[in-house]
Image (tube, grey):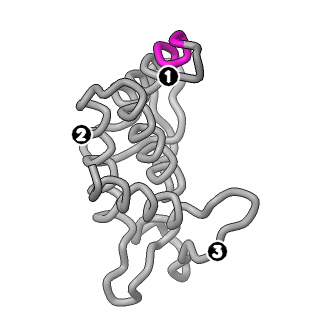
Amino acid sequence: AFGHPEWAVLAKRAADFVLRELFEGGVLWRSFRDGVRRVEGRIEDYGALAEGLIELYMATFEPAYLESAAQLAEAALDLFWDEDAGGFLSAPEGEGLIAAVYALTDEAAPSGASSLSHALVRLTGL
């Protein structure tokens, strides 16, 4: 990892923590404190983590990270894809929102739909 093998070790430690503590039963959580998970993840959380896990796989060639990225992407499709509209929701249906909100545009950071789409494309090639 850029001539710094310790960066891969740190990235693995962070990814292992997130996968162990914040991703369970197809649900990704946004925060964790004192053993308590809070706030379910949004599409940008799923997309960014899936991309990060793919990069970690590419750096370490440890298949567990690629498998976790695929599981995360599959969970995100189940939660956020709206077949009728042909687009990704920003939050899962049933979140108490008055109207469905779609992840349509990128701004300073990529939208969750862009991150997730990029991860899905990369997963098909790996």
Can you identify the residue that label 3 sits on? 105
Do the residues under discs 3 and 1 have CB atoms within 8 angstroms?
Answer: no
Observer-nearest residue: 29 or 11? 11
Give the CA separation, mark 3 to mark 1: 29 Å
- Look at the numbered disc 1 and give the secondary structure of its residue: helix
Q: Which residues are magenta?
A: 5-10
Do the residues under discs 2 and 1 have CB atoms within 8 angstroms?
Answer: no
Give the vertical position of 52 relative to 74 (above or below): above
Amino acid at dot 3: Thr
Q: Is residue 7 left or right of residue 61?
A: right
Amino acid at dot 2: Glu
- Look at the numbered disc 3 and give the secondary structure of its residue: loop
Residue at 51% x, 29% y is 32
Q: Is residue 35 magenta?
A: no
Amino acid at dot 1: Ala
Which quadrant of the figure has residue 83? bottom left
